[in-house]
Amino acid sequence: MREAFNIESGKHYVAGHRGMVGAAIVRALQQAGARQIVHKTSNELDLRDSSAVHRFFEAERPDYVFLAAAKVGGIWANSTYPAEFIYDNLQIQNNVIEASRRFGVRKLLFLGSSCIYPKLAPQPLKEEYLMTGPLEPTNEPYAMAKLAGMSMVRAYRQQYGSDFISVLPCNLYGPGDNYHPKQSHVMAALLRKFSEAVRQGSAEVEVWGTGSPLREFMHCDDLASACLFLMEHYSSEEPVNIGTGTEISIRDLAGKIAEATGFQGKLVFNPEYPDGTPRKVMDSTRLMEMGWRAKVDLGLGIRETLGGLSSADF
């Protein structure tokens, strides 16, 4: 089933190339010498349209697919648009995975998410803990869609012999993130809040929740590196966690961002907003035993991300 992953001569399709993860994968492919990288904007190709997706695959015939396209957002967005989160993500992944099988894609990588683990799963999160308990209610529709995508990858390997794999990254940050004030994830939301507070001379910054949840954050370039590594070295129906192995509380993260931005005012934690899962850190033993490690230090990654921001991001 498994063929050599040929970065230079293969034709790569990166679905979701304008998002933070997709853009990082494109950068990684370019740096690794890939000569053929295909991508389309959502205006050019609606991945929810199965006919359009099949026409695209029939015309382009990619060798490798990185399925990074998804509708994503933080707690507020997931709670406000649950129907869109499950419908859009199911449509996108169903269409791309089926078209990949039908038109002979040699290998596909499906990007899941750490949020698909049960809310109260043992920590750190091991791959075998998937689907062993109730999900976090604030993002259940999104998580259910991603679980369905992983199940689809497994089923296609079993029935068709497709060399499709699934990966589960921890919380991500970096250039190209979504900084919408309500729809962003926690890292991007805090980067925006503290940047604006410094620019406006604000005396305090409100942080949603109690600040107690523990999270693991990885720079998107590290994720892209891991994705290329796994495309070359991994072939199994079992998903693979991608994490750093280091966790930080939201309170400490806010303090780190405050320091990086030069904010010297007061941090106000608002417990009226939900915390989400109390603790979420990945057990990335499976990946690390293959020889891969994250390289970007969190403090440095935050400073570099801040340095690349402009008013257009907000």
Image (cartoon, helix red, strand yellow):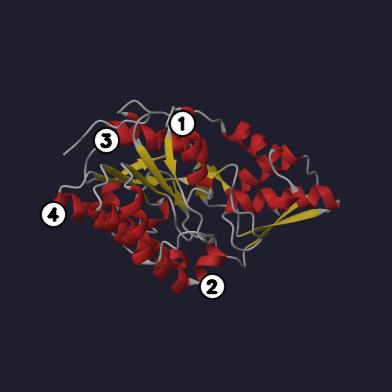
Q: How far apart are labels 1 and 4 at the CA level?
A: 34 Å
Q: Within 10 angstroms of label 3, few (less than 14), some, or many (20 or more) residues?
A: some
| Residue in the image at 64% along x and 59% along y | 180
The kind of residue on which mark 3 rests is Tyr
Residue 91 falls in image quadrant: bottom left
Asked whether the residues under the numbered discs 1 and 3 touch, taking CB atoms below 8 Å apart as contact, a structural biologist would say no
Q: Position of residue 213 (x, y in %)?
A: 53, 52
The mark nearer the N terminus, 2 or 3, is 2
Q: Residue 159 got which mark?
A: 4
Residue that badge 2 annotates: 80
- Disc 2 is placed on an element classified as helix
Mark 4 vs mark 3, foreground winner is: 4
Q: Earlier in the sequence, mark 1 or mark 4?
A: 4
Circle 3 sits in a helix, a strand or a loop, which is it? loop
Query: Is residue 223 visible to us here?
Result: yes
Q: How many neighbours does mark 2 have within 10 angstroms: few (below 14), some (14-19), or many (20 or more)?
A: few
Give x and y (percent) for residue 151.
25, 57
Residue type at numbered disc 4: Gln
Query: In which quarter of the view is residue 96 placed?
Result: bottom left
Residue pointed to by mark 1 = 294
Q: Mark 3 points at which residue?
A: 234
